[in-house]
Image (tube, rainbow, N blue to C red):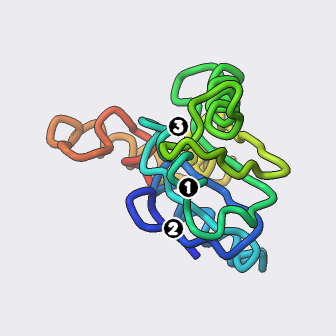
C-alpha cells in the first residue's frame, strides 16, 4: 500500500519506509515491485521534511501501526552533512516514540514503538545517483542536455528551480 502524509494511513504490513518526497516514493515503489518485496513494505510519502515529528506521530497513530516491527525514514542530505541529518531524524524518532524524551501523542497515550528503526540519508539527491553512472555521464547527448537546460534556465518556474539534477531527469 502506498500513501501520502496527507492521506489516512491504514497499515497492513510489518515494515514501513517513510520517504521524503515524490521522487523517492515513486522510485522505491517501482524498485520494491521489481525486487518482489512490494507486498512486505508499506511505503509512506512524507511530502517533505517540514513537520517531520508531526508526520511521524500521525503515522504512529494510524490504524495498524501497532503491528509495525520495523520503521525506516529516508531523506536526502540536501547540502547538509548526512550524519547531521541522520542525527536530527534519529532524535525526532526518539522524541515521537519515547514518552521520556517527547510529548507522546496528542491524546497523551504512549505511541507504539517499532522494534527497529533506521534512518537512511542520501549524500546526493536521487536524481544525481541515477545520472551518475559512467554510461549516462559519458553519453554524447549529455553536453546538449546541459546546454539546453542552461539556455532555458531563466524560463523555469516550477519545483525544479535550484535543482539542476531534477531538470535533467
Residue 61 appears in the figure: yes
Report the side of 34 relative to 166 (left or right).
right
Q: Of the residues under marks 2 and 3, which one precedes in the sequence?
A: 2
Checking the image for residue 59, the label placed there is 1
Q: Position of residue 127 (x, y in %)?
A: 53, 48
Q: Nearer the viewer, residue 96 or 71?
A: 96
Q: Position of residue 124 (x, y in %)?
A: 60, 35
Question: Dot 3, how many residues are within 10 Å of its Cα: few (below 14), some (14-19), or many (20+)?
Answer: some
Q: Are marks 2 and 1 in contact (CB under 8 Å)?
A: yes
- Report the quarter where the N terminus lies: bottom right
Residue 82 appears in the figure: no
Question: Dot 1, how many residues are within 10 Å of its Cα: few (below 14), some (14-19), or many (20+)?
Answer: many
Residue at mark 1 to residue at mark 3: CA–CA distance: 10 Å
Element at label 3: helix
* Residue sticking out furthest to the right: 115
Query: How many numbered marks, from 0 up?
Result: 3
Report the side of 3 relative to 33 (left or right).
left
Residue at mark 2 to residue at mark 1: CA–CA distance: 7 Å
Residue at mark 2 to residue at mark 3: CA–CA distance: 16 Å
Q: Of the residues under marks 1 and 3, which one precedes in the sequence?
A: 3
The residue that disc 3 covers is 53
* Residue sticking out furthest to the front: 108
Report the side of 147 relative to 80 (left or right).
left
Checking the image for residue 9, the label placed there is 2
Q: Of the residues under marks 2 and 1, which one precedes in the sequence?
A: 2
Tell me what residue is drawn at x 47 percent, y 41 percent. Answer: 54
- Report the quarter where the C terminus lies: bottom left
Tell me if residue 78 comes above or below residue 44 in the rendering: above
Element at label 2: loop
Amino acid at each position: 500500500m502506498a500513501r501520502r502524509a496527507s492521506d489516512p494511513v491504514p497499515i497492513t504490513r510489518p515494515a514501513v519506509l517513510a520517504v521524503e518526497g515524490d521522487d523517492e516514493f515513486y522510485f522505491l515503489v517501482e524498485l520494491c515491485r521489481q525486487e518482489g518485496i512490494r507486498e512486505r513494505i508499506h511505503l509512506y510519502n512524507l511530502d517533505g521534511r517540514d513537520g517531520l515529528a508531526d508526520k511521524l506521530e500521525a503515522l504512529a497513530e494510524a490504524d495498524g501501526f501497532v503491528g509495525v516491527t520495523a520503521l525506516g525514514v529516508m531523506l536526502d542530505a540536501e547540502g547538509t552533512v548526512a550524519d547531521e541529518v541522520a542525527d536530527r531524524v534519529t532524535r525526532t524518532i526518539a522524541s515521537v516514540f519515547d514518552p521520556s524524551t517527547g510529548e507522546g501523542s496528542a491524546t497523551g497515550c504512549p505511541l507504539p514503538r517499532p522494534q527497529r528503526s533506521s534512518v537512511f540519508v542520501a549524500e546526493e539527491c536521487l536524481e544525481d545517483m541515477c545520472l551518475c553512472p559512467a554510461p549516462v555521464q559519458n553519453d554524447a547527448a549529455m553536453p546538449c542536455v546541459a546546454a539546453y537546460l542552461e539556455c532555458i534556465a531563466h524560463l523555469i518556474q516550477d519545483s525544479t528551480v535550484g535543482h539542476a539534477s531534477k531538470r535533467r531527469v
